[in-house]
């Protein structure tokens, strides 16, 4: 489960996201919707730790800001909106690249 409390993000001195609460629970479908430029992608980047934020983000009850990137990667996956690859990888090969050492799964 990922929970965000009182998340705010400022870029270049301008507040893009202001005091947002969000929760995504296992087995439920969650959606972040809004018009273009409303901060949806900025919020998602804060939830992944890609952008600096104020507030609290927790993954399964653990504070994201206290985790090393490899720890966070064992609890969640991030799929960017667009990815440009210069190599002819299959989908299976790309997914395997994202697997953490020791977590071979069935791929």
Image (cartoon, rainbow, N blue to C red):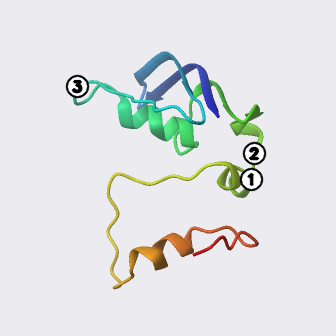
Q: Which of marks 3 and 1 is nearer the N terminus?
A: 3
Q: Is residue 81 left or right of residue 29?
A: left
The secondary structure type at the circle numbered 1 is: helix
Q: Which of marks 3 and 2 is nearer the N terminus?
A: 3
Residue sitting farthest toward the left: 36
Q: Residues within 10 Å of mark 3 (few under 14, many from 20)?
A: few
Which residue is pictured at 60% across the width and 36% down the height? 26
Does residue 103 sit above or below 44 in this rendering? Answer: below
Q: Residues within 10 Å of mark 2 (few under 14, many from 20)?
A: some
Does residue 104 sit above or below 31 in this rendering? Answer: below
- Mark 1 and 2 residues: CB-CB less than 8 Å, in contact? yes
- Mark 3 and 2 residues: CB-CB less than 8 Å, in contact? no
Which residue is pictured at 72% across the width and 36% down the height? 60
For label 2, the residue is 67
**The label number, if any, that marks residue 71 in the structure image:** 1
Q: Which of 19 and 81 is in front in this view?
A: 81
Q: Is residue 25 left or right of residue 89?
A: right
Q: Where is residue 16 in the image (x, y as percent from the top left)?
A: 39, 24
The secondary structure type at the circle numbered 2 is: loop
Quadrant location, the N terminus? top right
Give the Cα distance between marks 3 and 2: 32 Å
Give the Cα distance between marks 3 and 1: 33 Å
Does residue 59 sit above or below 85 in this rendering? Answer: above
Quadrant location, the C terminus? bottom right
The secondary structure type at the circle numbered 3 is: loop
Which residue is pictured at 36% across the width and 31% down the height? 40
For label 3, the residue is 35
């Amino acid at each position: 489960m990922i929970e965000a409390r009182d998340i705010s993000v400022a870029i270049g001195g301008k507040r893009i996201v202001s005091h947002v609460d969000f929760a995504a629970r296992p087995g439920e479908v969650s959606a972040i919707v809004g018009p273009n430029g409303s901060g949806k992608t900025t919020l998602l980047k804060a939830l992944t730790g890609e952008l600096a934020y104020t507030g609290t983000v927790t993954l399964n009850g653990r504070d994201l800001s206290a985790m090393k990137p490899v720890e966070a990667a064992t609890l969640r996956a991030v799929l960017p909106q667009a990815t440009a690859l210069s190599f002819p990888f299959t989908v299976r090969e790309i997914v395997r690249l994202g697997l953490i050492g020791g977590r071979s799964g069935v791929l």
